[in-house]
Image (tube, rainbow, N blue to C red):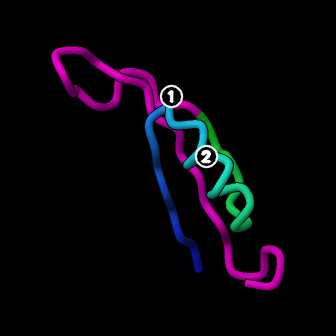
């Protein structure tokens, strides 16, 4: 029924690709991952069965 995807907030090319594939941006997850010595924000996407022909 539901597929989720996530990416770092600074990864704009991946966000564009997810939106082009029909995913909907659901929101920002603040300080969700610790990488390279600092906390980073993430962005959550989803697509539901029935969305845009899925």
Instruction: Residue at 22%, 26% (x, y): give it.
Output: 34
Q: Is residue 38 left or right of residue 32?
A: left
Q: Is residue 40 magenta?
A: yes
Name the mark on residue 51. none
Instruction: Residue at 61%, 46% (x, y): give it.
Output: 15
Specify few, some or many for label 1: CA neighbours under 10 Å numbering under 14, 14-19, or 20 or more: few
Up the image or down, 28 lies above or below 3; here it is above
Name the mark on residue 15. 2
State which quarter of the image contains the C terminus: bottom right
Quick one: label 1 or label 2, which is nearer the N terminus?
1
Name the mark on residue 10. 1
Instruction: Residue at 46%, 44% (x, y): give it.
Output: 7
Q: Secondary structure at mark 1?
A: loop
Q: Main secondary structure of the magenta part?
A: strand
Of 37 and 2, which appears nearest the observer? 37
Q: Quadrant of residue 37?
A: top left
Question: Which range of residues does the magenta coloring cover?
Answer: 28-54
Q: Is residue 42 magenta?
A: yes
How many numbered discs? 2
Residue farthest to the front? 13
Q: Quadrant of residue 28?
A: top right
- Residue 17 placement (x, y as % from top left): 64, 56
Q: Is residue 7 left or right of residue 31?
A: right
Up the image or down, 19 lies above or below 1; here it is above
């Amino acid at each position: 029924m539901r597929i989720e995807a996530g990416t770092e907030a600074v990864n704009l090319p991946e966000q564009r690709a997810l939106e082009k594939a029909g995913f909907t941006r659901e929101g920002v997850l603040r300080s969700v991952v610790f990488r390279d010595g600092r906390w980073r924000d993430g962005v959550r996407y989803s697509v539901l069965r029935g969305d845009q022909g899925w």
